[in-house]
Image (spheres, rainbow, N blue to C red):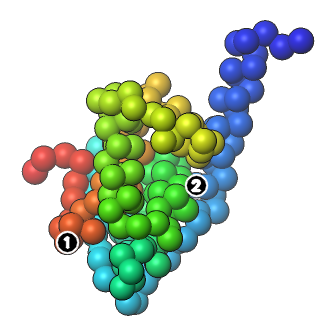
Amino acid sequence: MQTISAEKKSLNELYRQLILDHAKCPKNFGKQANSSHFAEGINPLCGDKIRIYVHVGKDNFIDQLSFEGTGCAISIASSSIMTTLLLKQDINYAEHYAKNLIMMLNNKEENTDEFKSSSQIEALKGVKEFPSRIKCATLGWQSFLSAINNKNTTTTEKL
Ligand code: ZN
């Protein structure tokens, strides 16, 4: 029988693997020629640079969502996870979701109900143990919000 801490450790290992898999083989990676919304996000502290391409269809659903860029494993994995969770979603729902996720990672809100079912979100939450990496994890989400609000550049630091 596993002790609770051993169980937690193997779960952490599972989440760590999920992040590494997304970083190695990011989903929805690539440029979109016909995006309706675009933004580039920069995290100067780590050197992460992410470009987000969104296409919103007539019915207000996100019918295309992709990203490209360079950065650390966490920034790439988080952006990859973002695209898989928000693609095909209603734009208003996606905006709400992204805002909540950023607040949650910054410990500003403990309303995590809507995130419970996703192992990808659980994996991202692991970054909270490393405060200096939270900006890596939120960069893709922040860039998504900038894109849909027609702000074409964003940075994690105030210039
Ligand atoms: Zn980073």
Left or right side of 76 for 135? left
The answer to whether residue 12 is above or below residue 134 is: above
Rendered residue at 60%/41% (across/down): 117
At a point 39% along the width and 80% down the height, the residue shown is 59
Q: Nearer the viewer, residue 16 or 125?
A: 125
Cβ of mark 2 under 8 A from ligand 1: no
Where does the N terminus fall, quadrant-wise? top right
- Comparing 124 with 26, the one in front is 124
Nearer mark to the viewer, of 2 and 1: 1
At 47% across and 62% down in the image, what residue appears?
A: 86
Please say if 66 is above or below 16. Answer: below
Look at the image and tell me whether residue 72 can be seen: no
The mark that comes first in sequence, 2 or 1, is: 2
**Residue 100 picture quarter:** top left
Name the amino acid, label 2.
Ala
For disc 1, the marked residue is 150
Q: Secondary structure at mark 1?
A: loop
What is the crowding at mark 1: few (fewer than 14 residues within 10 Å), some, or many (at least 20)? few
The answer to whether 140 is drawn above or below residue 8 in the figure is below
* Residue 29 image point, x, y percent: 53, 71
Residue 112: x %, y % from top left: 45, 34
Residue 158 percent across, percent down from the top left: 13, 47
Q: Which residue is mark 2?
A: 23
Q: Is residue 111 above or below residue 66?
A: above
Q: Residue furthest front?
A: 59
Q: Secondary structure at mark 2?
A: helix
Tell me the tag on residue 37: none
Q: Indicate the position of residue 20 as horizontal and vertical percent values.
A: 63, 48
